[in-house]
Amino acid sequence: MFENLQDKLDSAFKNLKGQGKLTDLNVATTIKEIRRALVDADVNYKIAKDFTEKIKDKALGADVINAVSPGQLMVKIVSDELTELMGGTVEDINIKGNPAIILISGLQGSGKTTFSGKLANFVKTKLKRTPLLVAGDVYRPAAINQLKVLGEQIGVEVYSEDGNLNPVQIAQNAVAHAKSKSLSVVIVDTAGRLAVDEQMMDEISRIKTTIQPQETLFVVDSMTGQDAVNTAKAFNDKINFDGVVLTKLDGDTRGGAALSIKYTVNKPIKFVSRGEKLDTLDVFYPDRMAQRILGMGDIVSFVEKAQENFDAKEAAKLQKKIAKNKFDFNDFLAQLNQIRKMGNIKDLLGMIPGMGKAMKDIDIDEGAFKKIEAMIFSMTPEERSNPDILNGNRRKRIALGSGSDIKDVNQFIKQFEEMKKTMKMMTKMAGSGKMKLPF
């Protein structure tokens, strides 16, 4: 995510390495490189120019204290300005109403239907409200089936009307249905439409006028860059949406949409979405995104994800088992599953300061977890509970049962034993007050 932009900004800051202070010359050189990096990321030139002019004014007016290098100060200034460019502060979604109505709009192929399912899951699990999904895309039959599959996966009702090709009427009937069943949030998925298609644009405008949503969201594919920003302006002129959703942030995202859209339409980015899994939807925090773009990590989001997925009572039990050297393969498997729930491993590591750059060219094989699981599942219950009994014959059987080589099994067991020793040592240090465990 934004790796190319991150590299180029990092290169720009190197102009200040070894410099004693910020001067007209070194600031001008750095500003030029930052502007070039933004334009390469598909940010509109005018936006890039205005942005870098603000940085220049702040940099030349700043005093560099002894404890902070010119490079560090420039990174801080750019971070602050990036945060402002992307909205400044987090913007909550409006779900006040009985029911609250959320209208989803966007181009064809932007990921609206998948996002609608993710949003329903977010509303249900995070906001503790009861959502209704509405199949308002009557032009693409697969969209209705897709929404029904998503609804079934998360246990959310999907409202659709077979044979009815009037999305305005469907949306209106769905709201009435939600009221009759005391469903608190209605999420209306609509057909993708081109900004130049007046008939389709008039249609979504009529849907909005008819159902009067509390929240209208514009879904945009973050990989489309400046084109997405131009489209957002056309949609905003027509339906005056309330917020933006950036999808496909796990792809080859240059950053143009994220950095330009707030400046262009003056509407906040409210959510960012990665991948197809229904729990990969995050509230957009401009400051955290700015830090990630600059390679500073996002430790706050990392901790939040950990807190969401780890049970404090179970963690306390685990700590006691580690202290008594009773940590076994059952515990290891449970922890592995907890980590996987947090999301893509490489993306998670990118949230840790300094790890993003270190992991940039390293391909993390998610399939490696399946290989480890296969080895553990090939063990008997006794073997999982008592790793010490794994002799040569047992290891051969595990290798055969998991489709692995005996060398792989031996290596995994060796790594497991080393991990146990390290964890026990950390627990002792925590008990002595020299170190605090992260769980």
Image (tube, rainbow, N blue to C red):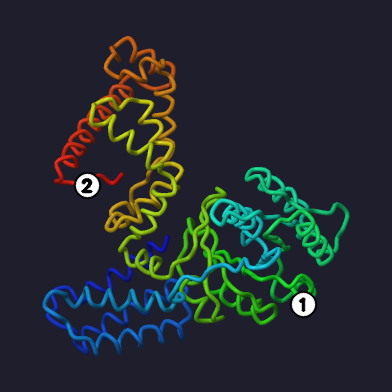
Q: Which image quarter holds the C terminus?
A: top left
For disc 2, the neighbor class at 10 Å (few under 14, some 14 to 19, many from 20) is few
Q: Which residue is mark 2?
A: 436
Q: Which residue is the extreme one toward the right?
A: 163
Q: Position of residue 204 (x, y in %)?
A: 75, 71
When asked about the image quadrant of residue 394, the answer is top left
Residue closer to the observer: 157 or 153: 157
Q: Which residue is the extreme one toward the top?
A: 393
For disc 1, the neighbor class at 10 Å (few under 14, some 14 to 19, many from 20) is few
Label located before the other in sequence (2 or 1): 1
Amino acid type at image mark 1: Glu
Residue at 33% across / 22% down in the picture?
A: 409
Side of 364 where 191 appears, left or right: right
Residue closer to the observer: 47 or 387: 387
Q: Position of residue 180 (x, y in %)?
A: 79, 56
Numbered label attached to residue 291: none
Q: Which image quarter holds the N terminus?
A: bottom left
Taking 377 as reference, is 431 above or below it? below
Numbered label attached to residue 198: 1
- Report, in whole angstroms, how far the alpha carbon at label 2 lies from the one at label 1: 61 Å
State the SS at label 2.
Answer: loop
Residue at 35% across / 87% down in the picture?
A: 54
Residue closer to the observer: 15 or 411: 411
Residue at 70% across / 60% down in the picture?
A: 186
Amino acid type at image mark 2: Lys
State the SS at label 1.
Answer: helix
When asked about the image quadrant of residue 82, the answer is bottom left
Q: Position of residue 236 (x, y in %)?
A: 64, 78
Residue at 32% across / 38% down in the picture?
A: 316
Taking 396 as reference, is 309 above or below it? below
Of circles 2 and 1, the one toward us is 2
